[in-house]
Amino acid sequence: MSTIRDEVLAANRAYVADFGDKGKLQMPPGRRFAILTCMDARLDPAKYAGLSEGDTHVIRNAGGRASDDAIRSLVISYKLLGTREWFVIHHTNCGMETFTDDVMRGLLAKSLKTATIDAGGWHDTGQGPGSTEGTFIDWLTVGDQAESVCADVRRIRAHPLVPRDIPIYGYIYDVKTGQLVEVPEATRIGKAA
């Protein structure tokens, strides 16, 4: 059995023992807002945004990008569960800045095993076969953090299922300091009408 699995199950038993009244939390988020952010393990939205269980929806993916699925989740968050404000939060030192769509497609074409990175870039260490299936995915890589936050807020704002009266704020989380730094242009783009 996996050591990680054992640790997760032990932690869950401790959590269950102290679960208390959390089973009575309502489905809609109590603070009525949603965060779209990166899956990076260094980001803890509960801590950097002062959240408790039941406060908000947190939608996470690689880069915190406004993919079709992220927008789908935001629309559900609003339409069915009553959120009234949204935050798009990217972060410094993001892995999505370390490759391009072409690099990812090339790595996948060679092997499906985990790649490595060094000063020379990404390298495939696995032996084939690879796959060309990744050719059809927009990997939503990041060239410039502030511009990617603006692009994501713009994409969300332009979506026909997103009401104009929802404010969308743009921020970059600094992994060295823990500070949320506003991207004023993104927040301007996301201003409620």
Image (tube, rainbow, N blue to C red):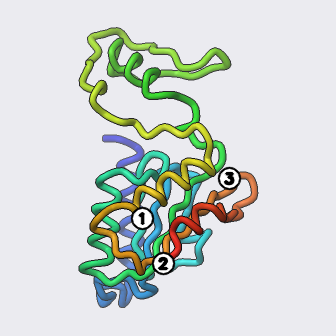
CA separation in Å, label 2 and label 3: 29 Å
Relative depth, front residue between 62 and 127:
62
Residue visible at 36% across and 68% down in the picture: 13
Q: Secondary structure at mark 3?
A: loop
Q: Which residue is mark 3?
A: 175
Q: Position of residue 50 (x, y in %)?
A: 59, 77
CA separation in Å, label 1 and label 2: 9 Å
Q: Secondary structure at mark 2?
A: loop
- Mark 2 touches mark 3? (CB < 8 Å): no
Q: Amino acid at mark 1?
A: Arg
CA separation in Å, label 1 and label 3: 27 Å
Residue visible at 44% across and 51% down in the picture: 65
Q: Which residue is mark 2?
A: 192
Q: Position of residue 42 (x, y in %)?
A: 59, 52
Q: Earlier in the sequence, mark 1 or mark 3?
A: 1
Q: Which mark is residue 50?
A: none
Please rate how many residues cluster around mark 2, counting C-alpha atoms within 10 Å: few if below 14, some from 14 to 19, many from 20: some
In this orientation, does residue 61 appear? yes
Q: Position of residue 135 (x, y in %)?
A: 30, 24
Please rate how many residues cluster around mark 3, counting C-alpha atoms within 10 Å: few if below 14, some from 14 to 19, many from 20: some
Q: Amino acid at mark 3?
A: Val
Q: Quadrant of residue 54?
A: bottom left
Determine whether 9 is above or below 77 in the image.
Answer: above
Q: Secondary structure at mark 1?
A: helix
Determine whether 35 is above or below 106 in the image.
Answer: below
